Image (tube, rainbow, N blue to C red):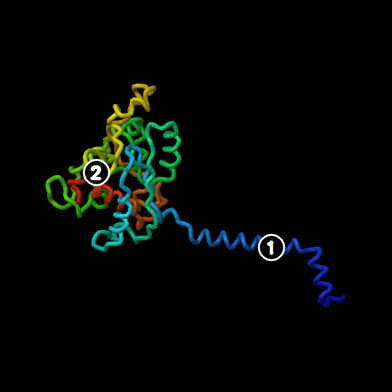
């Protein structure tokens, strides 16, 4: 058999089979792009998602402040929260009276978010037990800021410096009340829309039923499906990766002023 490679044979081969090589080249390009996109993409444990559905923030400096604290060895304990691998802190603000709110809560809130802020009515609908229980260990060792002043004026928050949502079903804590935080509402607040003041929304929500009026209390809750809450999750989170808990810690310190910083 004559297997000699000649210029004519190469030209004939390319003339009839060129499309095969084009397909191979395109496939290689797609494969390279896919591999690099996977290498450079943010993984679940490298970002923390906040689903905020009570106020619209006029100040986006919380994420920057929290990241700065995480890079400060005096403020961030790797022994407690794990190695600092966090790349993104995302704050999603949703109108709790919006027509798509229920859908967004079930998808963005319960599926992709680590920390949520929701109205009391949602917790009273029987869904509180779907969130992480705020045990003494979780509060004292992870969530309560040790570098901020509590109500007594001393540095270090205590459990009774905060108010909680307690389930009528089992008497356990599931939410931290944030609607009274100084920087959440009132003069000088970072959040500009107070849903407790329905008078300013009468026109927008003139057809709203009485039972659909806005909540007057809002609570911070933690999604047990998060991969950023260490041993307090449903098994998807590594014990040494609890960075979402640190961000809750920073959220309390940041917004609870004048008892905070």
Q: Position of residue 3 (x, y in %)?
A: 83, 76
Which of 229 and 169 lies nearest the eye of the viewer?
A: 229
Q: Choose top left, top right, bottom left or bottom right for residue 182.
A: top left
Residue at 25% x, 52% y: name it: 141
Secondary structure at numbered mark 2:
loop
Query: What is the crowding at mark 1: few (fewer than 14 residues within 10 Å), some, or many (at least 20)?
Result: few
Q: Position of residue 53 (x, y in %)?
A: 35, 38
Judge depth for marks 1 and 2 and give the one in front: 2
Q: Identify residue for label 1.
A: 24
Q: Quarter of the image for the N terminus: give it.
A: bottom right
Q: How far apart are marks 1 and 2 (CA)?
A: 58 Å
Residue at 42% x, 51% y: name it: 236
Work out whether 210 lies above or below 12: above
For the image shown, how many numbered marks are present on the structure? Answer: 2
Q: In screen coordinates, is 140 left or right of 31?
A: left
Work out whether 242 lies above or below 214: below
Residue at 82% x, 76% y: name it: 6
**Residue 205: numbered disc:** none
Q: Where is residue 40 in the image (x, y as percent from the top left)?
A: 48, 60
Q: Identify residue for label 2.
A: 183
Query: What is the crowding at mark 2: few (fewer than 14 residues within 10 Å), some, or many (at least 20)?
Result: many
Q: Position of residue 50 (x, y in %)?
A: 36, 46
Work out whether 113 lies above or below 128: below
């Amino acid at each position: 058999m004559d297997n000699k490679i000649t210029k004519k044979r190469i030209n004939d081969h390319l003339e009839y089979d060129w499309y095969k090589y084009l397909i191979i080249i395109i496939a290689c390009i797609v494969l390279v792009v896919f591999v690099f996109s996977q290498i450079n993409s943010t993984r679940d444990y490298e970002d923390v998602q906040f689903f905020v559905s009570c106020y619209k923030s006029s100040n986006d400096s919380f994420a920057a402040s929290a990241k700065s604290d995480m890079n400060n060895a005096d403020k961030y304990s790797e022994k407690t929260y794990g190695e600092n691998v966090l790349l993104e802190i995302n704050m999603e603000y949703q109108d709790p009276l919006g027509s798509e709110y229920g859908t967004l809560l079930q998808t963005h809130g319960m599926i992709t978010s680590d920390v949520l802020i929701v109205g009391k009515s949602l917790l009273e609908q029987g869904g509180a037990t779907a969130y992480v229980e705020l045990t003494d260990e979780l509060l004292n060792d992870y969530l309560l800021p040790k570098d901020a002043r509590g109500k007594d004026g001393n540095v270090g928050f205590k459990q009774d410096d905060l108010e909680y949502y307690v389930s009528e079903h089992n008497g356990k804590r599931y939410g931290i009340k944030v609607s009274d935080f100084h920087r959440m509402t009132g003069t000088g607040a970072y959040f500009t829309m107070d849903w407790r003041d329905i008078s300013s929304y009468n026109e927008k929500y003139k057809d709203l039923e009485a039972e659909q009026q806005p909540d007057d209390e809002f609570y911070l809750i933690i999604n047990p499906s998060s991969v950023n809450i260490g041993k307090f999750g449903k098994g998807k989170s590594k014990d040494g990766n609890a960075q979402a808990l640190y961000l809750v810690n920073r959220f309390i310190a940041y917004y609870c002023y004048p008892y905070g910083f």
